[in-house]
Each structure stands twice: as C-alpha cells, then as structure tokens.
Image: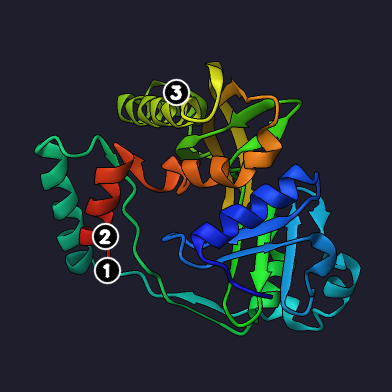
C-alpha cells in the first residue's frame, strides 16, 4: 500500500468521495504519511481493521490462531520515571500559567515487554475501533473521531475518567470541578473545530456517562455529543474536511495550534 503526502491524500479522498466510493484512511500525527485505499484493495496481510464492526479481519481465524498463549500471556510495562516526567510536566504548567494553553494532552512513551505479536494484540483487543499495520503498530480506542450521517457531522469528545468500582464513582466524576472544567474546554474546542466545516453547530448532549470495560476493570467515561450540518456536496470535499479537523482536539488541547507547539517542546 502506498503512502501519500497530505496534498496527494486530500485530492485522492476528494475524488473517491465525489465518486461515492468508500475508502479507509490512516493518518500519522504530523500528517506526513497517509494511506488512502478502497476496502477491496487493502491487503489483510499488511493491514487489519475493525471499526465498530466494519472489518476486513477474519475474527474466527484470528481467534483460532491464538494457540496456548491465552493462558500464559506476559505483559510488563516500564513507565517513565517520575523525575523524567516532571520535566515535561513543568514545561506544560509554565505555559498554562502564562496563558498559552488552557488544556494540554501530555503523553509519554511506555515500553511494553510481551510474548504477543502486534497482530495477537489486535486479535485480543475488545475495542470498538482498532487497527493493525504489519511490523508498525496496533491501535485501539473506544473513541470515534467524527461520524457523518445524512448530511450531519457528529463528534463525541471524551474527557473525564474514573474507576467504576470506587465508592460513589458516578457522583464523584460528575461533581469534580477539575473534570468538569476539562470537559467544558474540550467541548468548546470541538464545537469550534466543527464550525470550520459545518453550519448550525450545537451541543446536542452535554456530559453523559458511559461505562467502558478494560483489562483492569470497568471505567466510567464522561462524553458529549456535538453536531453540525454539512454543505450539500460535502463528499466531493471530504479530504479537505477531514484534514481541516485533524489532529483531533482530544489528543492535542486548546487552543490547538499553540498547544501542539507546547506538546512538541515538552514530550520526549
């Protein structure tokens, strides 16, 4: 499968959209390497996807191929040292105190040692959205980027998480002022992003709670629903539309452009 640059990818997406032909797209964070391919042309030996049931994966075959490893999975993580993380953290704090960012999604690499292959991780992940790319990566998430249905575009930002087994967890996450402020900030950012490509943008559901299942137990996750109306022939500009919204606000912060600069400075 070929990787396109941003300009090539936008043109290809727009053409396929104008012709009403479905396609899969994979975009790196810096938007420098993009795969845009029609589903029938995706080689399952190179790339597998399962996007809320839309999949090219032979689930039964993958399950049967697990062998005896299900009873002897090794999974060790090596989190960054607190002293090393503190350097990145304090860079972000300085920028927030200076008014350069209201919300920054700071992450760090965590090495994992396991006896599973990337494909086996894909097969075992019970996420609504997941993808495997041979010898490159596996990704899985409960969160959708955007959804378009009948001329309306939707986004469902998730911010605010708590262990569902904690006493009175639902009330605690709902009443936490820090979590409420973080959620309000990301909803405002996504609402602003959608306003760049759609009209009649509105928050149709604000702060509702979903329960997610993870390998460490259940979590409560606070989400909202934001909706806007696209122009009549949006399919012919779907590439421009998607790249206008990328990268997603939930993995960057607000304001997005400046916060991305802060992330580039602070992350290792």
Looking at the picture, how far across and down is residue 183, in whole percent?
40, 29
**Near-viewer residue (67 or 158):** 158
**Near-viewer residue (144 or 151):** 151
Q: Which residue is mark 1?
A: 268
Labelled pair 2, 1 in contact (Cβ < 8 Å): no
Callout 3 crowding tier (Cα within 10 Å): few <14, some 14–19, many ≥20: some
* Relative vertical location of residue 230 with respect to residue 135 in this rendering, above or below: above
Looking at the picture, how far across and down is residue 100, in whole percent?
17, 39
Residue at screen point 51% across, 34% down: 157
* Relative vertical location of residue 86 with respect to residue 175 in this rendering, above or below: below
Mark-to-mark CA distance, 3 and 1: 33 Å
Q: Which residue is mark 2?
A: 264
* Relative vertical location of residue 41 with respect to residue 142 in this rendering, above or below: below
Mark-to-mark CA distance, 2 and 1: 8 Å
For the N terminus, the image quarter is bottom right
The part of the image, by quadrant, that contains residue 237 is top right
Looking at the picture, how far across and down is residue 133, in whole percent?
65, 73
- Colour scheme in use: rainbow
* Label 3 or label 2, whichever comes before in sequence order: 3
Q: Which residue is mark 3?
A: 174
Q: Is residue 267 left or right of residue 215?
A: left
**Near-viewer residue (124 or 146):** 146
**Near-viewer residue (220 or 151):** 151
């Amino acid at each position: 499968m070929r990787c396109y640059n941003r300009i090539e990818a936008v043109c290809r997406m727009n053409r396929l959209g104008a012709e009403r032909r479905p396609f899969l797209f994979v975009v790196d964070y810096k938007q420098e390497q993009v795969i845009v391919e029609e589903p029938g042309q995706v080689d399952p030996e190179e790339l597998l996807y399962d996007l809320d049931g839309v999949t090219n994966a032979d689930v039964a075959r993958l399950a049967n191929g697990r062998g005896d490893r299900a009873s002897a999975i090794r999974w060790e993580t090596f989190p960054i040292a607190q002293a090393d993380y503190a350097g990145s953290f304090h860079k972000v704090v300085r920028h927030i105190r200076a008014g350069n960012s209201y919300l920054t999604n700071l992450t760090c690499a965590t090495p994992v040692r396991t006896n599973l292959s990337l494909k086996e991780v894909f097969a075992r992940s019970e996420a609504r959205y997941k993808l495997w790319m041979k010898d490159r990566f596996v990704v899985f998430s409960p969160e959708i980027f955007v959804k378009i249905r009948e001329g309306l575009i939707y986004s469902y930002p998730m911010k605010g998480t708590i262990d569902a087994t904690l006493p009175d967890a639902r009330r605690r996450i709902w009443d936490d002022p820090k979590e409420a402020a973080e959620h309000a900030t990301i909803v405002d950012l996504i609402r602003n992003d959608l306003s760049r490509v759609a009209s009649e943008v509105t928050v149709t559901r604000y702060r509702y709670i979903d329960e997610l299942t993870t390998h460490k137990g259940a979590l409560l996750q606070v989400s909202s629903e934001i909706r806007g109306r696209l122009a009549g022939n949006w399919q012919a500009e779907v590439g421009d539309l998607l790249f206008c919204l990328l990268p997603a606000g939930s993995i960057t912060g607000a304001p997005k452009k400046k916060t991305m600069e802060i992330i580039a400075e602070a992350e290792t």
